[in-house]
Image: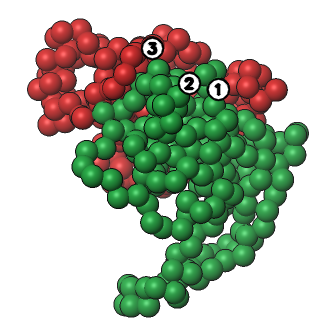
Amino acid sequence: MILTGPEIERAVSLRALTISPFSTRQLNPNSYNYRLSPIIRVSEERSFDARATHSWSTIQIPPKGLVLEPRRLYLGCTVETIGSLCYVPSLIGRSSLGRLGMFLQISADLGNLGKPHCWTLEITVVQRLRIYPGMVVGQVAFWCPEGSVMPYAGRYHDFSHAMPSLRGDQYHAIEPSEDL
Amino acid sequence: MILTGPAISEEYRRGRIWIEPFDIQHVQPNSYDFTLGSSLLVYTETVLDSARANPFELIEMNGDGFLLQPDRIYLGHTVEVMGSDTFVPIIRGRSSTARLGLFVHVTADLIDLGSRNQWTLQLHAVQPLRIYPGMRIGQVTFWAVRGDRKFYEGKYQGSEGPCASKAYMDHASVTR
Protein backbone atom coordinates (compact mmCIF):
# COMPACT_ATOMS: atom_id res chain seq x y z
CA MET A 1 0.00 0.00 0.00
CA ILE A 2 1.07 3.56 -0.72
CA LEU A 3 0.84 6.24 1.96
CA THR A 4 -1.56 9.13 1.43
CA GLY A 5 -0.34 12.70 2.00
CA PRO A 6 -1.99 12.92 5.45
CA GLU A 7 -0.40 9.55 6.36
CA ILE A 8 3.06 10.81 5.25
CA GLU A 9 2.58 13.81 7.56
CA ARG A 10 1.52 11.51 10.41
CA ALA A 11 4.51 9.19 9.87
CA VAL A 12 6.87 12.20 9.94
CA SER A 13 5.32 13.38 13.22
CA LEU A 14 5.69 9.85 14.66
CA ARG A 15 9.30 9.74 13.38
CA ALA A 16 8.55 6.61 11.39
CA LEU A 17 9.97 8.42 8.41
CA THR A 18 12.27 11.39 7.99
CA ILE A 19 11.75 14.33 5.63
CA SER A 20 13.82 17.29 6.78
CA PRO A 21 13.12 20.12 6.35
CA PHE A 22 9.40 19.30 6.15
CA SER A 23 6.65 21.65 5.00
CA THR A 24 2.98 20.73 4.65
CA ARG A 25 2.91 23.04 1.61
CA GLN A 26 4.95 20.42 -0.25
CA LEU A 27 2.54 17.56 0.54
CA ASN A 28 0.53 16.04 -2.32
CA PRO A 29 -2.43 13.61 -2.11
CA ASN A 30 -0.01 10.64 -2.15
CA SER A 31 3.56 12.00 -2.29
CA TYR A 32 5.83 14.81 -1.09
CA ASN A 33 7.53 17.38 -3.32
CA TYR A 34 11.28 17.57 -2.82
CA ARG A 35 13.62 20.32 -4.00
CA LEU A 36 16.82 20.41 -6.01
CA SER A 37 20.03 21.23 -4.16
CA PRO A 38 22.05 24.03 -5.83
CA ILE A 39 25.02 21.73 -6.48
CA ILE A 40 24.94 19.52 -9.58
CA ARG A 41 27.66 17.24 -10.98
CA VAL A 42 28.54 16.36 -14.55
CA SER A 43 31.40 14.35 -16.00
CA GLU A 44 33.50 15.70 -18.83
CA GLU A 45 33.92 12.18 -20.10
CA ARG A 46 31.72 11.40 -23.10
CA SER A 47 31.98 7.66 -22.72
CA PHE A 48 31.57 5.75 -19.46
CA ASP A 49 32.97 2.37 -18.48
CA ALA A 50 30.95 0.31 -15.99
CA ARG A 51 34.16 -0.99 -14.46
CA ALA A 52 35.93 2.37 -14.18
CA THR A 53 35.70 5.37 -11.91
CA HIS A 54 35.24 8.72 -13.64
CA SER A 55 36.03 12.29 -12.75
CA TRP A 56 33.03 14.52 -12.08
CA SER A 57 33.04 18.27 -11.88
CA THR A 58 30.80 20.20 -9.51
CA ILE A 59 28.65 23.08 -10.72
CA GLN A 60 26.86 25.58 -8.52
CA ILE A 61 23.55 26.33 -10.24
CA PRO A 62 23.38 30.14 -10.39
CA PRO A 63 20.18 32.00 -9.43
CA LYS A 64 19.58 32.77 -13.13
CA GLY A 65 19.57 29.03 -13.84
CA LEU A 66 21.67 26.47 -15.68
CA VAL A 67 20.87 25.03 -19.12
CA LEU A 68 21.16 21.23 -19.16
CA GLU A 69 22.29 19.66 -22.43
CA PRO A 70 20.78 16.54 -24.02
CA ARG A 71 22.83 13.33 -24.13
CA ARG A 72 24.60 14.22 -20.89
CA LEU A 73 24.05 12.70 -17.47
CA TYR A 74 23.78 15.07 -14.53
CA LEU A 75 23.78 14.06 -10.87
CA GLY A 76 21.73 16.28 -8.61
CA CYS A 77 20.72 15.93 -5.02
CA THR A 78 17.66 16.55 -2.89
CA VAL A 79 17.66 19.50 -0.48
CA GLU A 80 15.77 17.30 1.95
CA THR A 81 17.10 14.48 4.07
CA ILE A 82 14.72 11.61 3.31
CA GLY A 83 14.52 8.03 4.53
CA SER A 84 12.74 5.46 6.64
CA LEU A 85 13.16 2.04 8.20
CA CYS A 86 9.38 1.55 8.01
CA TYR A 87 8.32 2.67 4.53
CA VAL A 88 9.99 2.07 1.17
CA PRO A 89 10.62 5.32 -0.75
CA SER A 90 10.28 5.75 -4.49
CA LEU A 91 11.50 8.96 -6.12
CA ILE A 92 10.28 10.39 -9.39
CA GLY A 93 10.30 13.77 -11.12
CA ARG A 94 7.45 16.25 -11.23
CA SER A 95 4.99 15.88 -14.08
CA SER A 96 5.61 19.57 -14.84
CA LEU A 97 9.26 18.74 -15.57
CA GLY A 98 8.50 15.51 -17.38
CA ARG A 99 6.33 17.67 -19.65
CA LEU A 100 9.52 19.62 -20.45
CA GLY A 101 11.44 16.44 -21.26
CA MET A 102 13.39 16.02 -18.02
CA PHE A 103 14.13 12.47 -16.94
CA LEU A 104 14.68 12.34 -13.19
CA GLN A 105 15.77 8.98 -11.81
CA ILE A 106 16.75 7.06 -14.90
CA SER A 107 15.32 3.59 -14.49
CA ALA A 108 16.09 3.26 -10.75
CA ASP A 109 13.28 5.03 -8.90
CA LEU A 110 13.04 2.54 -6.04
CA GLY A 111 14.86 3.45 -2.82
CA ASN A 112 15.89 1.13 -0.02
CA LEU A 113 14.72 0.96 3.56
CA GLY A 114 17.53 2.56 5.54
CA LYS A 115 19.23 5.61 6.91
CA PRO A 116 17.84 9.05 6.00
CA HIS A 117 20.11 11.06 3.70
CA CYS A 118 19.96 13.46 0.75
CA TRP A 119 19.23 11.38 -2.35
CA THR A 120 21.27 11.52 -5.52
CA LEU A 121 19.12 12.32 -8.56
CA GLU A 122 19.99 10.97 -12.00
CA ILE A 123 18.98 13.64 -14.50
CA THR A 124 19.02 13.87 -18.28
CA VAL A 125 16.99 15.97 -20.72
CA VAL A 126 15.48 15.44 -24.18
CA GLN A 127 15.80 19.11 -25.18
CA ARG A 128 17.98 21.82 -23.65
CA LEU A 129 16.31 22.89 -20.41
CA ARG A 130 17.04 25.68 -17.94
CA ILE A 131 16.75 24.65 -14.29
CA TYR A 132 17.06 26.63 -11.08
CA PRO A 133 18.52 26.04 -7.61
CA GLY A 134 16.00 25.05 -4.97
CA MET A 135 13.23 24.38 -7.46
CA VAL A 136 10.61 21.75 -6.68
CA VAL A 137 11.93 19.03 -8.90
CA GLY A 138 10.35 15.74 -7.92
CA GLN A 139 8.17 13.71 -5.63
CA VAL A 140 8.84 10.93 -3.18
CA ALA A 141 6.18 8.34 -2.36
CA PHE A 142 6.27 5.78 0.44
CA TRP A 143 5.15 2.16 0.35
CA CYS A 144 4.30 -0.28 3.16
CA PRO A 145 6.57 -3.32 3.04
CA GLU A 146 5.68 -6.83 4.09
CA GLY A 147 8.17 -8.99 5.97
CA SER A 148 10.98 -8.44 8.42
CA VAL A 149 13.23 -5.45 7.76
CA MET A 150 16.80 -5.73 6.48
CA PRO A 151 18.15 -2.15 6.26
CA TYR A 152 20.31 -1.11 3.34
CA ALA A 153 23.95 -2.04 3.97
CA GLY A 154 25.41 -0.37 0.88
CA ARG A 155 27.50 2.77 0.79
CA TYR A 156 25.27 5.32 -0.94
CA HIS A 157 23.29 6.17 2.19
CA ASP A 158 26.53 7.47 3.76
CA PHE A 159 26.53 10.39 1.33
CA SER A 160 24.33 13.47 1.43
CA HIS A 161 25.59 15.03 -1.78
CA ALA A 162 25.32 14.09 -5.46
CA MET A 163 27.25 10.83 -5.49
CA PRO A 164 28.54 9.25 -8.72
CA SER A 165 28.32 5.52 -9.31
CA LEU A 166 30.50 3.44 -7.01
CA ARG A 167 30.25 0.52 -9.35
CA GLY A 168 33.86 0.84 -10.56
CA ASP A 169 35.19 0.98 -6.98
CA GLN A 170 33.05 -1.99 -6.03
CA TYR A 171 34.29 -3.91 -8.97
CA HIS A 172 37.91 -3.41 -8.01
CA ALA A 173 37.29 -3.85 -4.28
CA ILE A 174 34.84 -6.67 -3.84
CA GLU A 175 33.61 -8.07 -7.13
CA PRO A 176 36.72 -9.17 -8.99
CA SER A 177 35.00 -12.02 -10.75
CA GLU A 178 31.71 -10.30 -11.56
CA ASP A 179 30.70 -10.25 -15.22
CA LEU A 180 33.59 -12.52 -16.18
CA MET B 1 -1.39 -3.84 -3.14
CA ILE B 2 -2.17 -3.68 -6.80
CA LEU B 3 -5.65 -4.31 -8.19
CA THR B 4 -6.26 -7.20 -10.55
CA GLY B 5 -8.13 -6.68 -13.82
CA PRO B 6 -11.41 -8.04 -12.43
CA ALA B 7 -11.02 -5.74 -9.39
CA ILE B 8 -10.49 -2.76 -11.73
CA SER B 9 -13.74 -3.66 -13.55
CA GLU B 10 -15.58 -4.05 -10.25
CA GLU B 11 -14.29 -0.74 -8.86
CA TYR B 12 -15.23 0.95 -12.14
CA ARG B 13 -18.79 -0.36 -11.71
CA ARG B 14 -18.81 0.86 -8.10
CA GLY B 15 -17.68 4.31 -9.22
CA ARG B 16 -14.43 4.28 -7.27
CA ILE B 17 -12.33 4.16 -10.47
CA TRP B 18 -13.15 6.54 -13.32
CA ILE B 19 -12.36 5.46 -16.90
CA GLU B 20 -14.50 7.00 -19.65
CA PRO B 21 -15.03 5.48 -22.11
CA PHE B 22 -14.54 2.08 -20.47
CA ASP B 23 -14.03 -0.98 -22.68
CA ILE B 24 -13.95 -4.40 -21.06
CA GLN B 25 -11.65 -5.53 -23.89
CA HIS B 26 -8.96 -3.20 -22.50
CA VAL B 27 -8.87 -4.91 -19.09
CA GLN B 28 -5.60 -6.80 -18.54
CA PRO B 29 -4.68 -9.22 -15.71
CA ASN B 30 -3.53 -6.35 -13.47
CA SER B 31 -3.93 -3.13 -15.50
CA TYR B 32 -6.09 -1.34 -18.05
CA ASP B 33 -4.89 -0.33 -21.54
CA PHE B 34 -5.42 3.32 -22.44
CA THR B 35 -5.59 4.85 -25.89
CA LEU B 36 -3.67 7.66 -27.61
CA GLY B 37 -5.77 10.69 -28.50
CA SER B 38 -5.37 12.61 -31.76
CA SER B 39 -3.67 15.81 -30.53
CA LEU B 40 0.04 16.28 -29.96
CA LEU B 41 1.78 19.29 -28.44
CA VAL B 42 5.32 20.28 -29.32
CA TYR B 43 7.28 23.26 -28.03
CA THR B 44 8.29 25.68 -30.75
CA GLU B 45 11.63 26.59 -29.15
CA THR B 46 14.47 24.12 -28.76
CA VAL B 47 15.68 25.53 -25.42
CA LEU B 48 13.05 25.19 -22.71
CA ASP B 49 12.87 27.06 -19.42
CA SER B 50 11.34 25.60 -16.28
CA ALA B 51 10.55 29.07 -14.90
CA ARG B 52 8.58 30.32 -17.91
CA ALA B 53 5.62 29.39 -20.05
CA ASN B 54 7.18 27.82 -23.15
CA PRO B 55 5.45 28.55 -26.47
CA PHE B 56 4.06 25.51 -28.26
CA GLU B 57 1.96 24.39 -31.19
CA LEU B 58 -0.67 21.70 -31.48
CA ILE B 59 -0.57 18.98 -34.11
CA GLU B 60 -3.75 17.16 -35.07
CA MET B 61 -3.00 13.63 -36.25
CA ASN B 62 -5.04 11.88 -38.89
CA GLY B 63 -4.97 8.22 -39.87
CA ASP B 64 -1.44 8.57 -41.24
CA GLY B 65 -0.18 9.23 -37.74
CA PHE B 66 2.87 11.31 -36.86
CA LEU B 67 6.60 10.59 -36.95
CA LEU B 68 8.19 11.35 -33.57
CA GLN B 69 11.82 12.50 -33.62
CA PRO B 70 14.29 11.60 -30.84
CA ASP B 71 15.48 15.15 -30.16
CA ARG B 72 12.10 16.54 -29.13
CA ILE B 73 9.67 16.03 -26.28
CA TYR B 74 6.06 15.61 -27.42
CA LEU B 75 2.99 15.77 -25.23
CA GLY B 76 0.17 13.46 -26.14
CA HIS B 77 -3.02 12.63 -24.29
CA THR B 78 -5.25 9.74 -23.44
CA VAL B 79 -8.63 9.39 -25.10
CA GLU B 80 -9.94 8.25 -21.73
CA VAL B 81 -10.77 10.55 -18.85
CA MET B 82 -9.33 8.67 -15.89
CA GLY B 83 -8.70 8.90 -12.18
CA SER B 84 -9.74 7.60 -8.79
CA ASP B 85 -10.53 8.95 -5.34
CA THR B 86 -9.75 5.58 -3.74
CA PHE B 87 -6.77 3.97 -5.52
CA VAL B 88 -3.55 5.62 -6.68
CA PRO B 89 -3.09 5.26 -10.45
CA ILE B 90 0.37 4.59 -11.85
CA ILE B 91 0.87 4.67 -15.62
CA ARG B 92 3.20 2.57 -17.74
CA GLY B 93 3.92 2.14 -21.39
CA ARG B 94 2.80 -1.06 -22.98
CA SER B 95 5.57 -3.52 -23.53
CA SER B 96 4.74 -3.50 -27.26
CA THR B 97 5.42 0.24 -27.52
CA ALA B 98 8.44 0.08 -25.19
CA ARG B 99 9.93 -2.56 -27.50
CA LEU B 100 9.93 0.17 -30.16
CA GLY B 101 11.81 2.57 -27.87
CA LEU B 102 8.85 4.76 -26.91
CA PHE B 103 8.61 6.39 -23.50
CA VAL B 104 5.02 7.37 -22.60
CA HIS B 105 6.23 9.30 -19.55
CA VAL B 106 9.78 10.38 -18.93
CA THR B 107 9.59 10.64 -15.16
CA ALA B 108 6.18 11.12 -13.59
CA ASP B 109 4.25 7.85 -13.54
CA LEU B 110 2.40 8.50 -10.28
CA ILE B 111 -1.03 10.16 -10.43
CA ASP B 112 -2.57 12.02 -7.48
CA LEU B 113 -5.74 10.78 -5.81
CA GLY B 114 -8.68 12.78 -7.10
CA SER B 115 -6.96 13.87 -10.32
CA ARG B 116 -9.55 13.42 -13.08
CA ASN B 117 -8.76 14.33 -16.65
CA GLN B 118 -7.42 13.14 -19.95
CA TRP B 119 -3.88 12.40 -18.93
CA THR B 120 -1.03 14.16 -20.66
CA LEU B 121 1.57 11.69 -21.92
CA GLN B 122 5.24 12.71 -22.02
CA LEU B 123 6.23 11.08 -25.30
CA HIS B 124 9.86 10.49 -26.17
CA ALA B 125 11.13 8.18 -28.91
CA VAL B 126 14.65 6.71 -28.78
CA GLN B 127 14.60 6.24 -32.57
CA PRO B 128 12.21 7.94 -35.00
CA LEU B 129 8.82 6.28 -34.52
CA ARG B 130 5.47 6.77 -36.23
CA ILE B 131 2.51 6.73 -33.86
CA TYR B 132 -1.21 6.70 -34.61
CA PRO B 133 -4.30 8.07 -32.89
CA GLY B 134 -6.39 5.39 -31.27
CA MET B 135 -3.49 3.03 -30.65
CA ARG B 136 -3.32 1.33 -27.29
CA ILE B 137 -0.22 3.09 -26.05
CA GLY B 138 0.00 2.47 -22.33
CA GLN B 139 -1.55 0.94 -19.29
CA VAL B 140 -2.72 2.16 -15.94
CA THR B 141 -2.44 0.24 -12.69
CA PHE B 142 -4.30 1.00 -9.46
CA TRP B 143 -2.80 0.74 -5.97
CA ALA B 144 -4.44 0.60 -2.54
CA VAL B 145 -3.61 3.39 -0.08
CA ARG B 146 -3.02 3.67 3.65
CA GLY B 147 -4.23 6.75 5.54
CA ASP B 148 -6.77 9.52 5.32
CA ARG B 149 -7.36 10.77 1.81
CA LYS B 150 -7.05 14.28 0.44
CA PHE B 151 -7.68 14.97 -3.19
CA TYR B 152 -5.81 16.68 -5.97
CA GLU B 153 -6.83 20.27 -6.63
CA GLY B 154 -3.78 21.20 -8.67
CA LYS B 155 -3.08 23.11 -11.81
CA TYR B 156 -3.82 20.30 -14.29
CA GLN B 157 -7.21 19.24 -12.88
CA GLY B 158 -9.86 18.74 -15.54
CA SER B 159 -7.46 19.16 -18.46
CA GLU B 160 -8.45 17.98 -21.91
CA GLY B 161 -5.95 17.15 -24.61
CA PRO B 162 -2.20 17.55 -24.08
CA CYS B 163 -1.47 20.14 -21.40
CA ALA B 164 1.84 22.05 -21.53
CA SER B 165 4.04 22.27 -18.47
CA LYS B 166 3.06 24.78 -15.81
CA ALA B 167 6.35 24.38 -13.93
CA TYR B 168 6.61 28.17 -13.81
CA MET B 169 3.73 28.19 -11.30
CA ASP B 170 5.79 26.02 -8.92
CA HIS B 171 8.73 28.30 -9.49
CA ALA B 172 6.71 31.31 -8.45
CA SER B 173 5.19 29.67 -5.37
CA VAL B 174 8.07 27.70 -3.81
CA THR B 175 11.44 28.76 -5.15
CA ARG B 176 11.07 32.35 -4.15
Q: What amino acid type should be assigned to the residue bearing mark 1?
A: Ser
CA separation, marks 3 and 1? Answer: 16 Å
Determine crowd level at label 3: few under 14, some 14-19, many 20+ residues with C-alpha closer than 10 A: some
Instruction: State the quadrant of the N terminus of chain B.
Output: top left
> Can you identify the residue that label 3 sits on?
B150
Check disc 2 and report its element: helix, strand or loop.
loop
Q: Disc 2 vs disc 1: Cβ atoms closer than 8 Å?
A: yes
CA separation, marks 3 and 2? Answer: 10 Å
Q: Residue at (53%, 11%) from the top-left corner?
A: B153
Q: Which mark is residue A23?
A: 1
> Can you identify the residue that label 2 sits on?
A27
Question: Horizontal and vertical percent for residue A82?
Answer: 57, 44
Q: Nearer the viewer, mark 2 or mark 1?
A: 1
Question: Horizontal and vertical percent for residue A111?
Answer: 45, 51
Check disc 3 and report its element: helix, strand or loop.
loop
**Residue A81 falls in image quadrant:** top right
Q: What amino acid type should be assigned to the residue bearing mark 3?
A: Lys
Q: What amino acid type should be assigned to the residue bearing mark 2?
A: Leu
User: Image height check: is A164 above or below A179?
Assistant: above
Q: Which chain is green?
A: A
Instruction: State the residue lying farthest toward the left.
Output: B6
Colour in which chain B is drawn: red
Instruction: State the quadrant of the C terminus of chain B.
Output: top right
